[in-house]
Amino acid sequence: MISKQEIIEQLKTIVKPYVQNQESFDALTEETDFINDLKINSANLVDVILDIEEKYNIIIDNESMEKMINVKAAMEIVAIKLAEK
Amino acid sequence: MEKRVVITGLGVVAPNGVGLDVFTHAIKNGISGIKHDAELERLQFSCQIAGKPEISTELALQYFSELELRNFNSTGILYGVIAGIDAWKDAGLTLENNEEPDWDSGTIFGTGTSGIDKFRESIYKIDDFQTRRLGSTAVAQTMNSGVSAYLGGKLGLGNQVTTNSSACTTGTESILMAYERIKLGQAKRILAGSTSDSGPYIWGGFDAMRVCTFKHNDAPEQGSRPMSASASGFVPGSGAGALVLEDLETALARGARIYAEVLGGNINSGGQRGLGTMTAPNPMAVQRCIKNAIANAGIHPNEIDAINGHLTATSKDGLEIQNWSEALERKGKDFPYINSLKSMVGHCLSGAGSIESVASVLQLDQGFVFPNINCDDLHAEITALIDESKIPKELIKKELNIIAKASFGFGDVNGCVIFKKWKAA
């Protein structure tokens, strides 16, 4: 079973290229919001999702995608999808 | 009052040179950018040679972020952005990240199609039920205005940001559209240019029409032969050219270096009537376009020192010379110098007009006529009209005052622009 901390570290690597606020990225926690804190361009969110899908070999449906606004939600959805596999 | 319009910056991404210095050296020395193309050979094209600018990843990273280059697959946008930003910097302008856009500056940057390789990639995904995996930039890379949209964002342009499209006339048309907008006082500065994707999916349709040469696959550099008796079709090319057009007063006020003045020009169509068709130019319209351009520029035909022709190396070159000769009422030794950049770079399609205009403006600025290559055997139809000495095969160093540049495209569309050397008062 993959740990929470491991997922956070992996998500950090995935979002890194899209981040436009470095300070917020360095201080990333579960509460960090992708758009408001990391300043990721909203159009790029679909690219982040695709990268997450590829990393974990999962499929994130549109409803789950809508909820993925911050690190915590992303972690939960990844955990659910991994458990479903 | 109508504004005068000058050219203050140039940028070019051509098969025989990326960047102004390399390109200038290439055209002065008759260096060909035509090479054998392994992909065209693999795909069993009739014509297996082409003109393609060489862009390294290192160079691309000077114009695009790593993120922008992820899943990026649009050569036309790549060439256009490099040429456009180069022209902007060449004009002494900077890339600023201000809160407000630059309301006085815009871009009219044309293309025939955009991101055809990205389109192909996307179509395969869609047909494989993978639409959701196209990524966020499939639209920006494949919309026709992709190139102007990328440039608009990088330069923070707040005036008109658009893409024009008129086949092989595109690049000449974009200059004239920019000229008119500035002349009317609606913009102070327009980045005018055009680009064309490279590769089999752009060139295939022409190969199918048998308008590209298939006789020079073993000798690529000799393949593009405008005005020669042995011309047997054009060599497909690609690339981009860009020119910063600016209101004269604005340019003078900021102490910009001025290359040339755009005196005027004309755009028209032969309506696919008379001898004009989808693919053949109506000579009546071509001559009318040239004559109207001269009238619009307020010059006499005898003032034209050199012509940069369309001259693609198909069987139509003789007809083009005849049209120029009749429109200008000049022939034999009285005809201006004439050259075709296509002998070195092939036919860069929607990019042609602006790459060739950059070459024309360089000739005015530095005082030379670049040589035509591959035309030692001039076509008899052409030598019957104009003297051989007017078709230089070696570099001529000479002050030129006025150059006429014309482009003609599918759809029976024409464009002619008149450039004048700038002389500081």
Image (cartoon, rainbow, N blue to C red):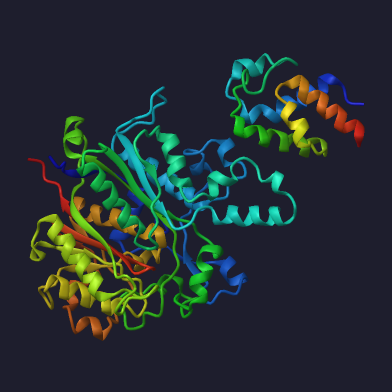
Q: In the rendered image of this protein, does residue B419 appear above or below residue B305?
A: above
Left or right, residue B10 beside residue B198: left
Q: Is residue B360 visible?
A: yes
Q: Quadrant of residue B43?
A: bottom right
Residue B407 position within the rendered picture, expressed as x and y whole percent measured from the top left: 30, 64
Residue B381 position within the rendered picture, expressed as x and y whole percent measured from the top left: 24, 84
Q: In the rendered image of this protein, does residue B257 appear above or below residue A74?
A: below
Q: Which sits in the foreground, A39 or B270?
A: B270
Name the quadrant of the C terminus of chain B. top left
Q: Which sits in the foreground, B175 or B373?
A: B175
Left or right, residue A47 beside residue B33: right
Name the quadrant of the N terminus of chain B. top left
Left or right, residue A29 beside residue B29: right
Residue under the image location 62 percent in, 70 percent down? B42
Residue B178 position within the rendered picture, expressed as x and y whole percent measured from the top left: 28, 47
Residue under the image location 41 percent in, 73 percent down? B234
Residue under the image location 56 percent in, 69 percent down? B40
Q: In the rendered image of this protein, does residue B300 appear above or below residue B391?
A: above
